[in-house]
Amino acid sequence: MEKLAIFKIIDDVPTLCGYYDKKEDAIEYLKEVKKMIDYKMQNQLVGEYICVPCLYFNLQQTTKAK
């Protein structure tokens, strides 16, 4: 399934923040982060974020090993 992954860059290392189905959902997440920075003094959230299209797989075991 195609999703958007948001990463925060921490010490030059991308750290996954989450997966989103739609561009609008990813933008809404980033707007909420910005609000937390501005109004709730969440200074640890300040920094660079990137949004990357990705193929997302959540593989599960469907048969039992014998």
Image: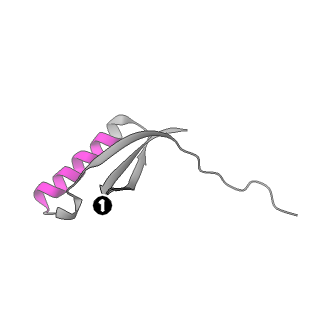
Residue at the spot of label 1:
11
Relative to 22, 62 lies left or right: right
Q: At label 1, which amino acid type do we have?
A: Asp
Q: Residue furthest front?
A: 12
The residue lying at 34 percent from left, 42 percent from top is 26
Vertical position of residue 3 compared to residue 62: above or below: above
* Residue 11 versus residue 22 in the image, above or below: below
Up/down of 20 relative to 18, above or below = above
> Which image quadrant is residue 53 in?
top left
**Which contiguous range is marked in magenta?**
26-40
Residue density around tag 1, few if under 14, some if 14–19, many if 20 or more, within 10 Å = few
Which residue sits at x=31%, y=54%?
A: 9
Image location (x, y in percent) of residue 54: 48, 40
Going 18% across and 57% down the picture, which residue do you hit?
36
Magenta-colored stretch includes residue 28: yes
Q: In this view, does 18 lie above or below 11?
A: above
Position of 60 compared to 53: left or right?
right
Question: Looking at the image, which residue is at 67% across and 54% down?
Answer: 60
Residue 4 shown in magenta: no
Q: Quadrant of residue 31?
A: top left
Left or right for 31, reference 50: left
